[in-house]
Amino acid sequence: MLDKAIVMIGGGKLQMPALRWAREAGLKVLLVDKNITSNSSFNADEFLSASGDNSEQIENFISRVKEKYNILGCYCGSDFGLISVAKLNKKLGIEGPDIRSVHDCLNKEEAKNKMKQAGLPVVEGITLEEIPSNLSNEFSFPLIVKPLDSSGSRGVSVAMDDKQLKIAFSNAKKFNAKVLVENYLKGNHIDISGIFINKKFFPGGILDRFFSPLPYRVPIYGIQPSSITQKLQKDLYSLLEKAAKSLGILSGPVKADIILTDSGPFIIEITPRLHGEVSSSFVCNLTYGTSPVKQWINWISSKKLPDEQAFHKEYCYSGWAGLFCNKPGTLKNIKGIQKAKEICGIEDVLIRRDIGAHFNSTTDNTALIGFLFAVAKSAKEVKKIFHEAMKTIEIDME
């Protein structure tokens, strides 16, 4: 009998819980990561050093090893590997997103159009290659400007006037020739996840996410459980399910970014994966004692259906906070990590970048050096713990 296995794309420090849960579920791990010395590579049963978006190389790798394993599913926590996952799902006949739904979601304009056709509330926007002279006739400042296929806040900023619009547009075009310009809506930002199994939707957790001051919108911390009411949570899960179905997502993980305004919720974007491991693996597990990542892996392994009430039974408040470089350059040293770990309520300090790593930007997620994780009896206490821990850490750049 062949050993049961899972294909995992991404094997850094943030993916370690997923790898551990796969092991606990009795799965062999076939890992793809471009870093041959990644933390998970030494614990994988098969390893390919390749970028997650190199579909051809990944398919060739799986073709070489599939005779040794009963491959039951795939897991990927970032946009870069989604096309590869969709192609493997089709080739191996396993559950998960299909190629068309992945393509539609990664093209933000196409995703918005399909959700609008389904009568769903989306943040209005327009895709441009150049700034038209009549843009102010259709939209009013402030405006969010982002590359059409952006992820990790790369190339995303907010323009308050024509001058800032030109700067933001130029910045976004460094990442994609097409730029998405959207209305900037004021409100609370919600991260929401779920899983489709046999076309049935299962909730996967909701987190309140907070951003840096304008003009850049960089996520700086997140807290669970969400501050919104149970009724609104139920409504947002229903909205996520409808949005996913409008894009043909009927199998596997799905997540959305939603803004809650005085006029109601609006969908910013949707993707056939779970939110990043910081939220979906670390914080969810602290708050609820489980995570959508773990639930998806358990389904792949044993066909155990998720508990529909799992994300309504919180054990505590928990959250993550990002540690960022304070200027472009090379990371020279990080001081005070042990002091931060000794603060009551700090669950862990995870440093994801090595000393000597180079940083080109301080205005998107590429500036992230690591994360703090905290638990407490209230959201207010979690924020207080983060504030105290941040004061102990010094990041030296050169």
Image (cartoon, grey):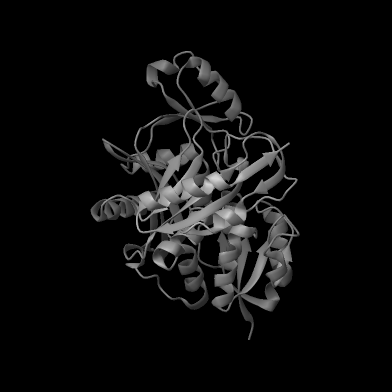
Residue 39 image position (x, y, % from top left): 68, 62
Question: Hey, which residue is sitting farthest top in the picture?
Answer: 133
What is the x, y in percent for residue 263? 26, 35
Label count reads 0
| Left or right for 345, reference 82 | left
Q: Is residue 115 visible?
A: yes
Q: Quadrant of the N terminus?
A: bottom right
Residue 81 left/right relative to 314:
right
Question: Where's residue 225, x and y in %?
Answer: 36, 56
**Left-right relation of 58 to 227:** right
Q: Quick check: 3 above or below 393?
A: below
Measuring 38% from the left and 52% from the top, which residue is drawn there? 381
Q: Residue furthest bottom?
A: 1
What residue is at 69 percent from the left and 58 percent from the top? 33
Task: Please tell me which residue lies in front, 14 or 264.
Answer: 14
Q: Residue 265 appears in which quarter of the rendering?
A: top left
Looking at the image, is 352 positioned above or below residue 148? below
Q: Residue at x 40, y 70 (%)?
A: 306
- Looking at the image, can residue 247 be seen? no
> Residue 272 vs residue 264: left or right?
right
Foreground of the two, 129 or 352: 352
Q: Position of residue 159 (x, y in %)?
A: 48, 23
> Quadrant of the image for the C terminus?
top right
Q: Nearer the viewer, residue 72 or 168?
A: 168
Task: Name above or below for residue 334 compared with residue 156.
Answer: below
Residue reaching furthest left?
231
